[in-house]
Amino acid sequence: PVHAIRISKEYFLKYMQSVGGSDINLTLREQDRARDRDRALKILRLQKDLFQRDFAKGDVLFSCGEDGKSLFIVEKGEIEIKGETGKRIQSIGAGSICGEHSLITGQPRDITAVCATGKCKLLEMAGKDFLTLYNSTPNMKQSFREICFRRDVQKAIAKKFGKEFSSSVDDLRKAFDAVDLDKSGAIDLDEVKALLRSIYPSLSDDDELFSQVLQALDIDGDKTIKWEEFKKVFLEE
């Protein structure tokens, strides 16, 4: 038998507010976001007009500076994502996507994607088809923004330090402290702008993209990114 207690939404929200930015609150909120992202990726995989593409180890899917006209869904194998300096940002596997950045931002490709295993099987989706899905619901848009803009922060940090992005606790702490310019213990919008200037040099200071990047990492919604949020987003368990 399964025993469960029913709790009203009103009571649950009141409880969430009472625990504020505690770890359990952040964990629950991030798990909720993660479910939305997983759902968005599954719906993406079910779309029509996806074209299978096969790559061998070392083959390049696309390179920095190219116009982005499609995205890729990884079906099999591992894809290595490199920033404009050639430093590794992350490796992604089955179920993940790459190439969404150009479609969401309208900017040229700012990463190079390379097949890192013996064989890589991917599905390619036309940009116009992705944007139709992306704009279909607020949750869908937010989920893909989180995937895109969290990766942007990784790119900017890798460029700032001149080395591969590392998700170890020590390296994440160093990165957080370097971005937290005023040493307040939280990264605010101005500090997000300062970090991202290296990868978005031409954007105006009031471009909404900066606040969207902040929102992608601001788990508790207080318009800052605290260390516990930063760690929860980027730490590989």
Image (cartoon, grey):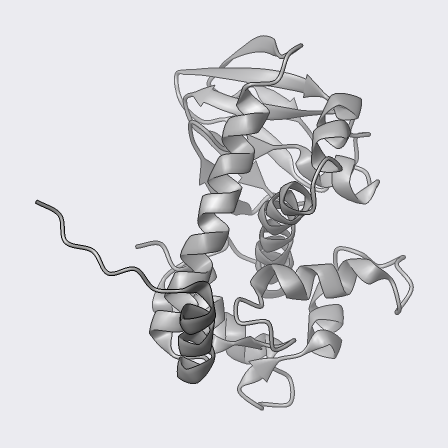
**Residue 167 percent location from the top left of the image:** 41, 58
Q: Nearer the viewer, residue 138 or 205?
A: 138
Q: Residue furthest left?
A: 1
**Residue 231 percent location from the top left of the image:** 43, 67
Q: Which residue: 34% across, 64% down?
A: 7
Drawn side of residue 169 relative to residue 79, left or right = left
- Note whether 117 is above or below 191 in the view shown: above
Q: Nearer the viewer, residue 65 or 130?
A: 130
Q: Which residue: 47% across, 70% down?
A: 10
- The answer to which image quadrant residue 103 occupies is top right
Quadrant location of the C terminus in the rendered image: bottom left
Drawn side of residue 189 relative to residue 30, left or right = right
Quadrant location of the N terminus in the rendered image: top left
Drawn side of residue 170 relative to residue 225, left or right = left
Residue 172 visible (yes or no): no
Residue 42 visible (yes or no): yes
Drawn side of residue 46 relative to residue 108, left or right = left
- Note whether 44 is above or below 53 in the view shown: below
- Note whether 45 is above or below 37 in the view shown: above
**Residue 33 percent location from the top left of the image:** 50, 53
